[in-house]
Image (cartoon, grey):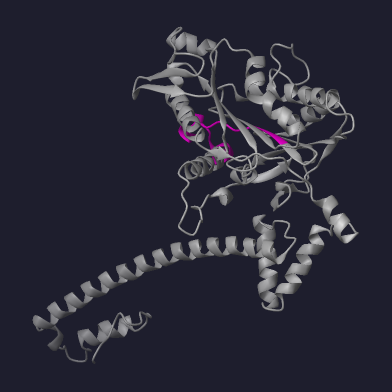
Amino acid sequence: MSHITICARFRPLSSKERRDHGDSVSVQSVDSETFIFKDEKEGDFTFSFDRVFYQGSEQLDVYEFLVQPIVQDAVNAINGTVITYGQTGAGKTYSMEGPSILECDGQKKGLLPRVVDGLFQYIKSSDEATKYTIKLSMVEIYMEKVRDLFDLSKDNIQIKESKVHGIILSGVTEVSILGSTEALHSLSRGIANRAVGETLQQETRTGKLILVDLAGSEKVERTGAEGKLLDEAKTINKSLSALGNVVNALTTLTFSPQGRSNHIPYRDSKLTRILQDALGGNSRTALLCCCSASPSNASESLSTLRFGARAKHIKASPRVSHNDSDKHTKKHGTPSPSNDGSCGRILNKLTEKLDIEDINLLEELFILEGIFSYPNSVEDLESTLEDVRQRTISTLQEGLGELMLMVEELKRENKALKFRLAAAERAGVLHKKAPGSTGFAHKVFQALSAFSFPGLFRSGM
């Protein structure tokens, strides 16, 4: 078991920050791994990470320490993930891309072009007997939908899961590349199509290398957004909150006497679902917490650093990924059947025990929710069904809670009404009838009979 590699990076002060606060900063360096963060409202805090990149740090320093080992492992079929996290303007995209992924000097080159160059360098120096295929796919999560940045017509990519490949994006465009220049031009085209952020996925053998540039983590009220932009900001905050909940659940992971762990809410957002392997799964993962050192952004920077401090306790189990397709071919003499065919056969099998309406409902639910996970056996589907069952139970429990509150409210109203009726009877009002009128109590119960409250109202009249 290994831990996620966590680094903090503080960008230089902007011209506006210098005008507002001069050269004042909130960070006091202790060494290359520890620093003191000063917040006027909350006081001083000491943080320790695997490495701290202060204002004078170079792009190459970040790459060599944080990312280069992951790139090397990816060539050896070990999954890897690099995530940049922080508020808008804290240096996430600059760290990931640099000024431009196509044209910039070597000193300012970002992580993404360095990863591309590093991949081909490692492949060139590897065993000549080994053949590599590199494919690029690029997506963004926009308003809780996964969009293909290489094909904008694919604006709702479904997230699925395979026992062999882990989390995959079904139907996403994959561009085969033969060199660094070709890869960077493809990525530049995808960047031009994005709305908020991007994910780069690279496959080598059966390994994956994912680079994630997250949206800004600042609070909605600080964005100044209105209308559609406000809706986007709320969705982003919800997605990042789901990420925080997953991190909290993983850092407080407990097991029952039966060996079952507590629930990890990966399915609460598309972001956490895509990052399921990276967070506590089969991946070597690195997190770069990008911050502003200015006192004007102290609260947001402190929130980012606290997130990193929690994430450093997550344990991962990176391992070499093996493709079982060759084994299947040797054993059965034919290639593995298509996943669509497998799904169809499993659903047909279930028709022996379930009504056709239930089967159709399950199939539609799986497609809509993006949780159909390449089931190659009945056991796989049973696992998916168990997930649906747990989510259904959770929804029903919430509905039951609301219903019980309504029942309690009706009981209180019923009790109050009975009290008023009893008081009226004691006062003798109910026994005084005007000529041609109907008794007051009879009128009350006649009115109540128009409503259906079984068990709540009873009359001996």
Please name the residue shown 35% across and 19% down the image.
Answer: 40
Residue at position x 69%, y 20% in the image: 110
Give the total of numbered labels: 0
| Residue 167 percent across, percent down from the top left | 68, 47
Q: Quadrant of the N terminus?
A: top right
Residue 139 drawn above or below residue 445: above
User: Most extreme residue toward the left, as rendered?
Assistant: 427
**In percent of the image, x 50 and y 62: which residue is there?**
395
Nearest the eye: 94 or 4 = 4
Residue 244: percent from the left, percent from the top? 50, 40
Q: Quadrant of the C terminus?
A: bottom left
Residue 213 lies in magenta, yes or no?
yes
Estimate the x, y position of residue 159 in percent, counting from the top left.
69, 50
Q: In the picture shown, does residue 436 fall above or below 386?
A: below
Visible residue check, residue 199: no
Residue 154 visible: yes
Q: Nearer the viewer, residue 207 or 82?
A: 207
User: As drawn, is 262 to the left or to the right of 352?
Assistant: left
Instruction: Residue 443: give x, y in percent of width and height.
Output: 26, 84
Dividing the picture into quadrants, the one containing residue 357 is bottom right
Q: Quadrant of residue 287?
A: top right
Quarter-of-image position of residue 321: top right
What residue is shown at x 88% (from left), y 29% (from top)? 178
Residue 222 falls inside the magenta stretch: yes
Task: Return the residue nearer the eye: 191 or 168.
Answer: 168
Looking at the image, residue 271 lies above or below residue 127 = below
In the rendered structure, the answer to whether residue 260 lies left or right of residue 24 reads: right
State the residue in front, 264 or 149.
Answer: 264
Q: Is residue 242 left or right of residue 164?
A: left
Residue stretch in magenta: 209-232
